[in-house]
Image (cartoon, rainbow, N blue to C red):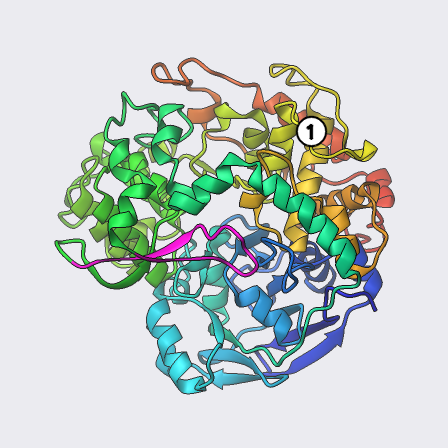
Amino acid sequence: MASGYTGKVLFVDLTTGAIQEEMISEQVYRRFLGGTGLGARVLYERMKARVDPLGPDNMLGFVAGLLTGTPVPGSGRFMVVSKSPLLDGWGEANSGGTFGPELKAAGYDAVFFSGAAAAPVYLLIKDGKAELRDAAKLWGKDTHETEELLHNEIGVPGVKIACIGQAGEKQSLLAGIVNEQGRIAARNGLGAVMGAKRLKAVAVKGCGYKVGVANRDKLKDARQIYDQLMQANPFTNQLKEGGTAGGYKFLVSIGDSPVKNWSLSGLDAFANAENLAGGKMDEWKLNKYACYACPVGCGAMIKQETGPFAVPVPMHRPEYESLAGLGGLLMNDNLLAAMKANDLCNRYGIDTISTGGAIALAMECYEKGLIDSRDTEGIDLKWGNAEAIVALVDKIGRREGFGAVLADGAGKAAERIGKGAEQFAVTVRGKSLPYHDPRMAPALGTAMFADANPAHHMDCKVARMLEAGAPIGKDPALQMPAVPFDAFDQKGPMYALGFAYNQVLNAAGMCALLCGNVAPPPIAELISAVTGWNMGYEEVLQIGRRILTLRQAFNAREGVTPAMFQLPKRIMEEPLTTGPLANKKINFEALKYGYFSAMGWDYESGKPSIQTLDEVGLSELTLDLAL
C-alpha cells in the first residue's frame, strides 16, 4: 500500500450504535485522494438520492486530506461533507488547526456518520478504538464549554475535539462545526446536520500512527521549491504580521470588500476602515499560533477585558471574512464590537460570513421600513449600531426572538420578512456571498455560482492566476494561452484547468491561503514523494476534473439545476454608481456557460455528459444518474 494515508475509514450508524471499520483500496485513493474527493466518492456511492438533509438518511463525513499529517507545509486541513440543508445539494466545509492530523494519527483517514441517535452522544476515538458516549450533559453548552467538559471527562492530554454549539443543536442553517474553540468548518449549515443527528462532538486522540513518506529525498526537493514560492509571495509576510485581516483597509480601498450590504464600495463610503485593520488588534494579542505543518502562523489569540464588549478570556483574533461581514458590510467601524461578535459566533458555532449577511439584510429592511423596532424587539438596527450587532448575534446564536428570523441566513430571512425583502438578500440559493466582490475578478464570480459549492471564494485562486497571465508551473499540462480580460466567451478551458487544480489541493488537505498569488505548490511532486506514485500533472488535473464532475453529478442527482444558482441582482444587474467599481459589469452568464461547456456538463440540467463521465472514469459510479 502507498504511503500518505492509513487506508482505514470508520462508519458510524448513530441509529443502531454500530461502528464499522473498513479498508479503502489504493485505487480509490489514487483516483480521489482524500478530503473533498474521498468525501464525494463515499457519499455518492452510499447515500440515496433526495434524502432529507436533516433526516437520518443523510450522511456526514469528517475527511482528512491525503497529505494531512505529513511534513508538507500547509497540509493540515480537513473537510466536512454532507448534503447541505441550506443548499439542498452538495455541502462541504473546510477547516484547519490540528483535528485532521490527529484523526490520521489515530489511524483513520475519515469517519462517516449515518442515522440519528435517540439522545445526544459524542464519538470518542482513542487507543485505536471508537465508541459512542452519552452527551446529555453537553447538550445546551457552547463550544468552549463543550471542549472543557470533554477534556475533563476524557482526562487524556492532547485530545482534539470538533463540536457544535447551541446553534447546531437548534438546527440553524448558519451552524458550523468548531474545533479548538475557534477553528470552524463554517459554511453550508453542516452543524445543523450534526445537531439533527444529536451528535454533539467528535473527540480524537492519536494512538501513535505515523503517516508514512515514500521518498524523503524527493519530498525535500519538492518542499524546497514550495518554500521558495512562499518566500517570494508578499501575501505570506502579510499573513505572518496581521493575519488574514491585515489588508482590510486596502481591500476596502480597491472596492474588493463590500460596504453597506454590497450597495457601496471604497473608502469614500467607509472612511473609517482603518479602525478595523488587523494590526489594530496587536494591542490585545496574547500569542500567535499556526495550523499543523504551517510555516506562516496567521492565527492569534487575543484578550480584551474592558468596556461593554469585553471578553475576559482568550479568544481567536477575527479573520478577514469575519471583520468584513461584521464590520464594513454593516457600516460598523467599532473593532471591539466586531471582536466580541466574532467570539459569540465561535461560541455558538455559527458562520460569520452568513451571520453578517443576515444582519445586513435586516439593517437594510429596517432602513427601508420593511421592519421596525416592534419586529426587532426594540433593537435599533440602524447602520453601524455596534450594540445592536452584538445583541443580534447573540439572539441568532440562541435562535431566539428576532434572531430566529435570521438564524437560517439571509435567503430564508427574506422569505420570512416578505414585502420585497429578497432584493436585499445578497446570496446564491440563500447562502451569503463571501466578502470579495465578484466584479473584481471574473474567475471569482464564476466560481461563486458555477461550482457545486456556490458562494465560495477559496477554490478559484489558480484560475485567477491564469486569468492574470501568471504561470502556474512549467509542465506542458499547466500551460494556458492568454485570454483578454473581457473575452468572456473564451475563458471556460482556463477556468476548468484552474478549478481542477484547486480541487486537488483541497483533496490533498492543502491550505488555500498558501496556494496562490505567486504560483501554486508543486502538488504532483508533493503527492508523488509522499505516496510513491509516479504522478504527473495530466493525472493530477484529471483527478481534479473527476472531483469537480462528481460533485456536480451529486447536485444533478438531487435535482439542483444550474439555474438555481444565480448571482444576486445587486451583482448582476445593479452596477455600483460610485467608488472603485463604479459602472463595472461583467457577463457572468457567458463565463458560466463557457465553463460548463469546457467541463462537458449540460447547461440546462447540470448533468455531466456520458462522454465526460467516461473520460473521468465515473460511468460505473453514476449509473443511477438518469442522463
**Could you tell me residue 563's position as x and y percent?**
59, 33
**Could you tell me residue 616's position as x and y percent?**
83, 45
| Residue 620 quadrant | bottom right
Q: Is residue 55 magenta?
A: no
Residue at the spot 54% in from the left edge and 78% down from the top edge: 205
For label 1, the residue is 471
Look at the image and tell me in which quarter the C terminus lies.
top right
Mark 1 lies on a secondary structure that is loop
Q: Is residue 107 above or below residue 465?
A: below
Residue 42 visible to an observer of this rendering: yes
**Could you tell me residue 359's position as x and y percent?**
30, 43
Q: Is residue 43 above or below residue 148?
A: above
Is residue 518 shown left or right of residue 297? right
Residue at the spot 49% in from the left edge and 78% down from the top edge: 122
Is residue 127 shown left or right of residue 343? right
| Residue 381 quadrant | top left
- Magenta residues span 286-305
| Residue 424 quadrant | top left
Name the foreground residue: 178 vs 594: 178
Residue at the spot 40% in from the left edge and 44% down from the top edge: 241
Is residue 159 shown left or right of residue 343? right
Dot 1 amino acid type: Pro
Q: Is residue 284 above or below residue 250?
A: below
Look at the image and tell me in which quarter the N terminus lies.
bottom right
